[in-house]
Image: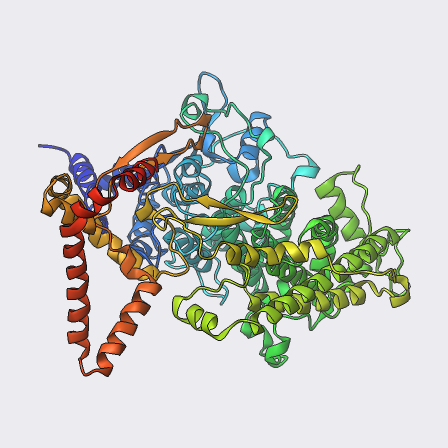
Amino acid sequence: MPAPTDVATVRMRAYLNLPLPERCRELAVLIDESSTTELQNVFPLLIDSIFGVTNNVGWGLHSINLRRHPQEYEILSNFLGPQGPIFSLCYKLLPDCYLKYDFPVSYLPPKIQVMLEEGIIPPFYSDKLKNDHSSRMPSALSMNPFEYYIFHFAYHLTNPWLQLQQQENVWINWETVYVQLAHSYLYHFLPRDNSPVLPIIGAYVKKIPSRKIVQLPEAKRVQTPRLLRSMVLSPSAPTSPGQGGGPHQQCLPQVWRSETVVQVFLDFWLEYTEEEKIPSQPLNSTLASSLPRRHSIHSGEHIRLVRAFIKTLHEFANSASGDRSAMDELKRIILPSVQGKIYTFLRKAIHHWPLDSSFRLILEAWLSFIQPWRYVPELSYSQQGKPPEEDRGKIHDPERWMSFVANNLLAYTSIFQQLLPRFMRTDLVAPKNALMLFRVTKVFSQPYLPQMLAEAECYMDDCNLTRNKISTKQWSAVARQQILELEGPSYQYVPMFSENTVSQIIWFLSIIKQAHLTATSIVEALEKRNTEKKFLRSLWEFFSGEEHSTDDIGLAERKRVPGFLAIAQQQIIEIFQIKVEDIPQAAIVADQEYHDSILSDSFCQSQCEGACVDDSRPGVFVPIQDERQHCRYIEYMGDPELQPVRSNECGVLVRWLYRICEMINSKYERQIEMFYNREDFVGRLTKKVLQPPTSVRQLPKRVNGGFTVGSEKKIPPRLSLRVLASYNFMTAILICVILLRLIGYGVPASLFIVSCTWIFYIVIGAIFEPLITRASPNRFTASATAFSGN
């Protein structure tokens, strides 16, 4: 008779092969019915299946989307939620303090691996390390079930296998179930209403091995903090006379889960290691040999989660009530413990981020970090009265936030000066870039913030602070200590309001002015072109959904740019208190070359209108700057049925009709090809209805370690109904129905007449095709040869 643990393992393996709905339902029943002994061995199997640790994507947490997969999204949100079956399993196994699971050291962030290799053991990992007996180097972390799950969840975002197998666009992939679960964990384990973390569990006793801990150097303590002081969390902490150890032991169940979530997310998500500094040989070389090399470039999903993490930390810290509980102590010291690592991550990410519009992701994360006053709970306004809606998220009490500004001075001034050259090289006429500049200047121009920054850096000798009459030694010492810890003693701090910075700002103002003039001229030119359109062309654009006379951004967005730039320019003048006479009054004119390049898109489309372009192989017109302006047509080389939805097509109908055709083509592939290859009347009729066979060239693609080999794929004859999704086709059908309706036919009869007319046209064409072919054999042969060369 098999042991109960073997039965549970067999059931688990069988359930993991079921479809997702049945899988989660059966696993929930198994977790509820099985004993702790039976679940001990199946727990790591379940975790490995969920996250696909080795060479797959697990249950698809990064691909299951709310819009495309609503049922799977809801099922996984409930199953993996903070109060779902997976955490019930963790809490069920938790009371056994000797039950530990190994998390490989090679999965840790590169910086943590380097520290362990150098013998520097961060306090958070001191009681978890497990050494290899042969090499006597750390090989794994021994952790309880809750920690084991949280570590795997955090690692799932940075798993290098996902970088190789990611299929969707990561810049728009932010409604996934993984993002939803991350938000749920942050809200649940970092409560902002002074409520305890549910479920309330008993005292958890850690099994701490005896280990000689290497003390961290002073400069590294900020980067790898222990969130709570040992005197708050340690069950063996000394107590005052007459006070037992009970209250101290009760502190640990209240906060250790919150501390674990914050520390693990901080280490995994806010780790930015340059590509050349990533260790090529991690500590556990046996396991690491099968891992692909990590990349330092983060996805949009990653940066959005970093921003959500920062916002949650602000909300959690601002909800402190002063009741002297362990949770309140965690709220009080959580930001001082993590702010150094947040600053380092943001500074490095900004430095390495590409110069495109996706930069707004990391920019918004930075702006969230430097504005803690935006994330004050509603309860904090109960005593002072609720502020007006327009004043929400602004500084009302500068004394309350002065400590944060002084402790994070580099996050304001150093990163601002880091952004300044970037904005000077950025195309500020583009709407997204103009909006980013406006967002930055709006934050720094809000009341009190410039004065707070000047006060925090007033100890600098070369800083012009004539407007700041009060010098506070306290904040100067705090700022000096922060600079020393984060950047080292060799770092040369440049004050934000120094003469050097102000001179760069004055030059930047001239760049903004030129961009403002250029944006204004583009808007005026586009508006003038719109007013000069003929009536029939405007009517055609209304029905077809195409607009040939504007660029790809659109006039509505272009109109917002001059306003953004004008406000940003005025806000910069107010921040640095620059006098108008100090700004160079040299003649600044619009960039005519840039103006012409933007309007050339419309020129290309109007130039190429009416050209004979094969509609089955669509492409785009690309302007080529030569001796004179002309265009080149770049052809789409993939499967014609998988081309992106065009501007004159209905996206929903395109996808719906493709599924219908795909089902028919796959089911009747042999019959379709047999009818198409016939030489009689049926074959000619089939050729009129079906799409001909074609060849698709698959170009070499970049992969890890080189390029794939290019190939050519043959696509057989197939049914295609994509033309029915065209606005042009629908407009023509609508006009026919209206005309037939005017002479007395109803809508069903009109559609029947149109269908019969189309069938008659196809049949007549198939009947007379041999006569047409014999009449013009050379022309037919030439066209057939041209088509086969596609």
User: Is residue 283 placed above or below 719 in the rendered structure?
Assistant: above
Between 184 and 328, the residue placed more toward the observer is 184
Q: Is there any visible trace of residue 723 in the rendered image? A: yes
Q: Examine the image and state in which quarter residue 654 appears.
A: bottom left
- Looking at the image, the residue that sits furthest to the top is 134
Q: How many marks?
A: 0
Q: Is residue 178 left or right of residue 596?
A: left
Q: Position of residue 578 (x, y in %)?
A: 85, 64
Image height of 68 relative to 126, above or below: below
Quarter of image, res 37: top left
Q: Is residue 617 left or right of residue 212?
A: left
Residue 183 coordinates in the image, percent (x, y): 44, 57
426 above or below 561?
Answer: above
Q: Residue at x 24, y 55 (%)?
A: 721
Q: Is residue 71 visible?
A: no
Between 119 and 202, the one lying in front of the other is: 119
Tell me where residue 115 appears, x and y as whole percent. 58, 30
In the displayed structure, does residue 767 sit left or right of residue 405? left
Q: Choose between 538 and 670: the one closer to the eye.
A: 538
